[in-house]
Image (spheres, coloured by chain):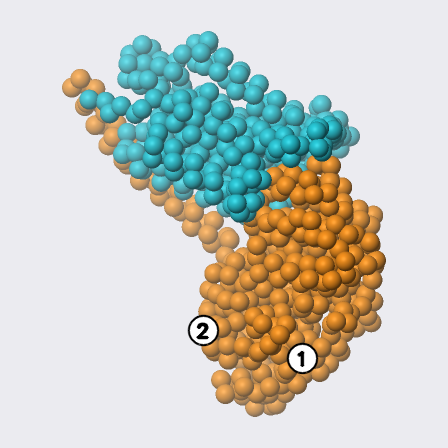
Amino acid sequence: MATLLQQLINGLVLGGLIALIALGYTMVYGIIQLINFAHGEVFMVGGFASLATYSYVLPDGLKSDWWFALPLMAIGGALVAVILAVIMERFAYRPLRNAPRLAPLITALGVSVILKEAVRLWYPGATAPVPFPRVFVNKTFTFEVFDGSITIGSTAILMIVVSIVGAIILQTYITRSRMGRAMRATAQDPDTARLMGVNPNRTIVLTFVIGAALAGIAGVLYGIQITNVDTEVGFLYGIFAFTAAVLGGVGSIKGAVIGGFAIGLVKTLSGQYLPGGTQYDLVWIFVILIAVLVFRPQGLFGEPERVRA
Amino acid sequence: MLYRHCRTEAEKGHHVRNQTVKAGVLVAGALLLAACGTNKTESGAGGGNQSCDQSKGTLVIGVIAPQSGGLSALGLGIKNSAQLAADQANEKCAVKGYKLAVQTEDDQATAQVGAQAATRLSSNANVVGVVGTLNSSVAQSVQPILKGKNIVQISPANTNPSLTRGKDYGTAPKRDFETYFRVCATDDLQGPFAAKYLVGKAGKKSIAIITDGKTYGEGLAAEFKKQAEKDGAKIVASAKVGEKDTDFAGVIATIKGSNPDAIYYGGEYPQAGPLSKQAKDAGLAVPVMGGDGIYDQKFIDLGGKEGDLATSVGAPTDTLPSAKAFIDAYKAKGFKDDFSAYGAFSYDATNAIIGSLAKAIEGGDWSDSKRADLIKNVQSYSAQGATGEIKFDEYGDSTNKLLTVYKVSGGKWVADETGTFGG
């Protein structure tokens, strides 16, 4: 029983991280029907950028004051991620907006390779995992439960809280604010939205910006949780986030969050209870991806894609 | 409707041209990055003694080891130490008439890339021998390629016993590759040595074993398990992690239920370090013990904690006088990277090739027909190296079976016990 609870907690922590990244995937798809495969690398760059902020920007005296250092690192990571996303959108995706859907997809793959290799070659020491300081209260809470104990770390709690709060803020923004309405309008029908006075370019850029900011924050949270960053994690977590977005229904924010937590839980619970153990936990995630695409391609909360006449 | 159509057409025209330009920029950028990141480094032995006769050309010693990726710390140490040996040989005019150069190929710790590296080296007629590989899994694909061209291969770090004695190495040893040698001890000694320490000296009786599924980790853990159970310990849990995993919360929760008092990890430091830290965070603050794959400062940087243990091949580098000469020479060369766990072994392996080469050529010329002589000379090679006595038995294994247990103490690896495993 204790193990089950522990794995549930682990799953939620992982799920929170995946949800933050999946939000970026789902929003961009919702608005320009592009699966931005480079988004996973944006997450990875955010992690490295926050590490760079810590190492090079933060004055030494303040390094241990987490309430100052952590927000600064988050801002640093998110800022670099946002700048990267804006550049990506402007030079790699905007010119291909009217091109057949395959072209921006391949471009996205290309951008992801460029980002990963750029960090691996030019960030000092990035050819191997780079240690990341745990800039947060370093406490673990242990609870005696039934037949054992469960442990949850402070960074894990932070991860879950930030992802849920972030998703709620985002949902509120999308539904209540003017820009949010503009984004929903552009997602529904870009031409009519333009007729209504919505600037499509600005709206799309804003979508990328929000997605990248969330990915950048996810990068910092990943760093303080795992205490190292590696150029490989972009691809891995990008795939998880993509699966989560598809599972929840691309285009739906609620779907991305629920999909993210679902994927996290699948990974930990399958590693514990299904045959093959932890070595096959990734297999089950992709089995779900295939099942979703075959049986319910619109995901849990998405709308079936209508072919417009 | 028509108006919109015309506009889009014109925009599309613009877009196509802009597209081409931008695509061109991107491609150029990519090629630039590719050029910057070549995975092959060729370095001629620097500072050749001018009074040496080097008229007959250059002979190449190949190095196959990870130069990028998580294990690059070990691979770079191997490369630099081989370079050091070649430079010293050039200064001493060890091989008359020839200059020695080192050509390093990055195998990225992957068997498939290692095979490509071996093919590339074997197609060069001037390659006399290869120092490599680091990973036992890579060696499995490199061995047949080098044997096919009769190129001698000495590994500074492969520890899986099946590489020299075949898959039934315990019961029916058989040497499959006469061209393959190694200067380090093997896992059928390292595993039991670790077990004797962990169970006997450290008194751990409920051990959980985690491996990364690769040849080295699996082999080492299996050997450890055999001896640990013989010595009375119980293996309470067994789990595997993926090669690229960074988040071990799931695995740790799986083994935590069985209450282990120690974890034995079969794998390498990029994962062992975070695993140790995450285990502690999850409430499982037990010592993590591993093999030579985790014996690197990076293990501690990435999360290894006080009290973690590792075994490694050979005696601690700073205890032998010949080792001190190697360390001083390495420092004097000013390499950017540390010689790390296998530097001294790589140095000895390179010297073995150089010494055997000098004897095989003996003032004559290098040719393909000399390869058989070279292999014979390596087989009968005997010298004192930085890691102790360098000599090979009939399977190509080193006769030097020393092993050391190291413990993390004060943020560094400190030698705890050196010895051999009797059997």
Chain with colour cyan in the figure:
A
User: Which element is circle 1 on?
Assistant: loop
Q: Position of residue B377 (x, y in %)?
A: 62, 85
Q: Mark 2 or mark 1: which is in front?
A: 1
Q: Earlier in the sequence, mark 2 or mark 1?
A: 2
- Residue under label 1: B392
Q: Position of residue B264 (x, y in %)?
A: 70, 53
* Letter of the chain that mark 2 sits on in the rendering: B
Label 2: element kind: loop
Relative placement, left or right, of A187 versus B145 is left
Classify residue B100 by image quadrant.
Answer: bottom right
Dot 2: few (<14), some (14–19), or many (≥20) neighbours within 10 Å?
Answer: few
Amino acid type, mark 2: Ser
The tint chain B carries is orange
Q: What's the residue at 28%, 36% (across, down)?
A: B17
Give the residue at x 54% y 63%.
B138
Label 1 resides on the chain identified as B
Name the residue: 82% across, 54% down: B202
**Mark 2 = which residue?**
B123
As displayed, is residue A40 above or below residue B305? above
**Distance between mark 2 and mark 1 Cα atoms:** 27 Å
Image position of A295 (left or right of A223): left
